[in-house]
Structures are given as structure tokens and as C-alpha cells.
Amino acid sequence: MAKLPDQTLNNIFYLQRRLVELIDEAKATEFDLFERFGENEATLPELDQMQSSVERLRMPYSRLHTLALGIAEYQPIAPDAMLNLLAQTIEQTEALIGAVEASISETKQNWNLP
């Protein structure tokens, strides 16, 4: 059976939750910035950055879902290449989360947003 260890599954679900939370936070930050200051020369780069962050967060969410499901359906064991891709995706996702958290925090600080 191509069963992932509980720790790996928990990590996948945790990362997916963080991705969803960060998508929400990036969109809320984008909305707050737009509502308070509008779309102008000063805000446009950071509005674009928030939108870009959302796009960047969507991809690993989908990839984690697809890989976890594919591994669960693979019988009797998942190929090493698929397991390696999952490990690589987890590592990249953790790094991305840190980068997007910093970006959101910086935007909020620059514009005194809640």
C-alpha cells in the first residue's frame, strides 16, 4: 500500500492550511491597501505584489493535493520520483510561506495597515 506516514500527511495538511490562511491575508491586505489609499503610483507595486503572492501560493496548494492523492492511489507502492517530488514540494512550500509572510508583514508595516 502506498501510504504516507502520519507525520508527512499532517505536514501536508498543515501547509495547505497555512497556504489558505496566507491567501486570505494577502487578499485582505490588498483590499485594505486599496480601500485606504486607492490604486496609484505609490500603491500599485504593493497591490501587484499581494496579487502575485496569491498566485504563487495557489500552485503549491494544488501540487500538494495532487501529489498526496496520487500517492494514496498508487499501488502497491508509490514511485520514488513521486515521493521525491512531494518532499521537494514540501520544502519549497515552507520557504515560500516564509517569504510571503515577510512580504505581507512589510506591506502592512509600510502602510500602517492592521
Image (spheres, rainbow, N blue to C red):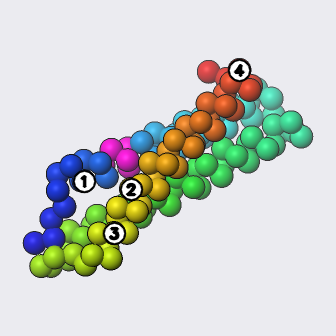
Res 61 seen here: no
* Element class at badge 3: helix
* 107 over 74 or under it: above or below: above
- Amino acid type indicated by mark 2: Ile
State the CA–CA distance, disc 4 to disc 2: 32 Å
Marks 2 & 1, CB-CB < 8 Å contact:
yes
* Disc nearer the start of the sequence (1/4): 1
The residue tagged 1 is 8
Query: Mark 4 and mark 1 in contact (Cβ < 8 Å)?
Result: no
In the displayed structure, 93 sits above or below 63; it is: above
- Mark nearer the N terminus (1 vs 3): 1
Q: Residue at x 58, y 50 (%)?
A: 54
- Based on the displayed image, in which of its 4 quarters is residue 50 positioned? top right
Quadrant, the N terminus: bottom left
Q: Where is residue 86? Give x, y as percent.
A: 34, 64
The residue beneath circle 4 is: 112
